[in-house]
Image: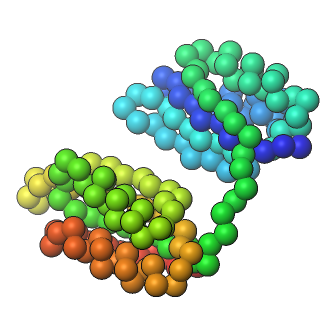
Amino acid sequence: MLRYLITLQVPDRKGLVEQIAHAVSRHGGNWLDSELRHIDGIFAAILLLEVPSEHWDDLLDALECIDGMALTSARAGQQQKYIKRLSFNLVAYDRPGLVLDISNRINALGINIEQFSSKFETAGHTGIALFRATISLGLTDPMQEERLTESLYSIGDDLVLDKLNLT
């Protein structure tokens, strides 16, 4: 069995996850990891699957037969080794370029972004536009955490960080 990474998107409708899971199961696949989201009428997913190599092409054909489905796929790579994983919530006033600023600061420290989920919302009591993100990182050096915190706080006084877990 080989590991494959699939990304897909399709206009959202009821039963999509069941259709995808059925195709994976029918072709001897094992669903290992995933992120599934509905965003603005589109269902988007990233799937890590383990599939017998002799069934891979048939599985791709089955998935492509789902009405409106667009997908990409590749053999999965090796997992990076980190000394520590860090997850946190970040909240700041929304503004153009904020994701670029955050990602530049993380990259400048040699830190890998493993997961980045964000959303726009307005503060209920003031109506101010807010940017919220949950970010998971892989650290390779014990000093990266302190440097990262300092770097992110220097973005502005409106930025709030809340560490979720350290492993």
154 to 68, vertically: above or below: below
- Please state if 165 lies on the left or on the right of 102 as rendered: right
Q: Nearer the viewer, residue 124 or 74?
A: 74
At horizontal 71% and vertical 50% (from top left) the residue drawn is 77
Residue 27 in percent (x, y) is at: 85, 30
Quadrant (top left, top right, bottom left, bottom right) of the C terminus: bottom right
Report the label total.
Answer: 0
110 to 52, vertically: above or below: below
- Please state if 109 lies on the left or on the right of 160 as rendered: right
Residue 152 in percent (x, y) is at: 29, 71
- Please state if 150 lies on the left or on the right of 72 as rendered: left
At horizontal 15% and vertical 72% (from top left) the residue drawn is 157
User: Furthest-left residue in view?
Assistant: 126
Residue 121 in view: no
At horizontal 53% and vertical 59% (from top left) the residue drawn is 114
Q: Which of the 4 quarters of the picture holds residue 61?
A: top right
Q: Nearer the viewer, residue 108 or 55?
A: 108
Residue 139 in percent (x, y) is at: 53, 73
Residue 144 in view: yes
Q: Which of the 4 quarters of the picture holds residue 163?
A: bottom left
- Please state if 132 lies on the left or on the right of 158 as rendered: right
At horizontal 59% and vertical 41% (from top left) the residue drawn is 46
**How was the colour assigned to the protein in this rendering?**
rainbow
13 to 74, vertically: above or below: above
Residue 120 in percent (x, y) is at: 27, 48
Q: Nearer the viewer, residue 108 or 149?
A: 108
Quadrant (top left, top right, bottom left, bottom right) of the N terminus: top right
